Amino acid sequence: MANEPITIYKLIILYTLSRVETTLPQDILYDYIIKQGYTNYFNAQNALSELLQADLVWEDATYHLAYYGLTKAGEDTLALFGNQLSPDIRGEIDEYLKENRMEILNETSLVSDYERTPQGTYLSSCTLREGNHVLFQLALEAATEEDARKICENWRESSEELYRMAVTRLLRGKQA
């Protein structure tokens, strides 16, 4: 890899993904690159697209958001070319991830999506995660796409209460 700007952007994305235990949405991936003044949104998007095309990064898309993770090929590429990323930049990324840990946890712990079923209804899937570990998952069938979308949109504000209620009820039984 030549030491050109697009290569640095790609390495920043690969390094960032290698330093977290979960997938990341694109806005968190781009936040560091853009805030530090390395590039703009369009160049960051181009770098991510090229990483996806090269199968160095994988994408898990929901109805409103995509999450990205590092593939084995991405790990290998970072191992081979990561030294082109200066220790200062690696340190800045590590510091950024440390300072923004809570925001990253909030953004990645609640995931919801829906899909059309063969019967013509919609299945909403709502997940509470800690890193890549699923703590709680709920799947609800909805008659319309609008209802499925509402379920997904309300998951963020209702997840804690639903999780607590389910755990309490299931551990204590009917008297809870």
Image (tube, rainbow, N blue to C red):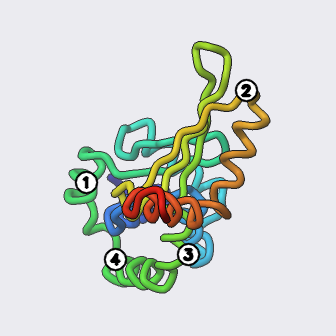
Q: Which mark is residue 75?
A: 1
Figure check: 35 above or below 73: below
C-alpha span from label 1 to label 2: 42 Å
Residue 43 in sight in this render = yes
Say which of marks 4 and 3 sits in front: 3
Residue at the spot of label 3: 103
Left or right for 4, reference 80: right
Q: Which mark is residue 143?
A: 2
Amino acid at dot 3: Glu
C-alpha span from label 1 to label 4: 17 Å
Q: Which mark is residue 96?
A: none
Q: Earlier in the sequence, mark 1 or mark 2?
A: 1
Residue at the spot of label 4: 86
Marks 3 & 2, CB-CB < 8 Å contact: no
Q: Earlier in the sequence, mark 1 or mark 4?
A: 1
Marks 1 & 2, CB-CB < 8 Å contact: no
Say which of marks 1 and 4 sits in front: 1
Q: Give the percent coordinates (x, y) of residue 20.
A: 36, 67
Q: Dot 2: what SS?
A: loop
Q: Give the percent coordinates (x, y) of residue 8.
A: 43, 63
Categorize mark 1 by other alpha carbons within 10 Å: few (<14), some (14-19), many (20+).
some
Q: What residue appears at the point 36 percent right and 83 percent down from the top-left corner?
A: 91
Amino acid at dot 2: Ala
Categorize mark 4 by other alpha carbons within 10 Å: few (<14), some (14-19), many (20+).
few
Q: What residue appears at the point 59 percent right and 41 percent down from the top-left corner?
A: 113
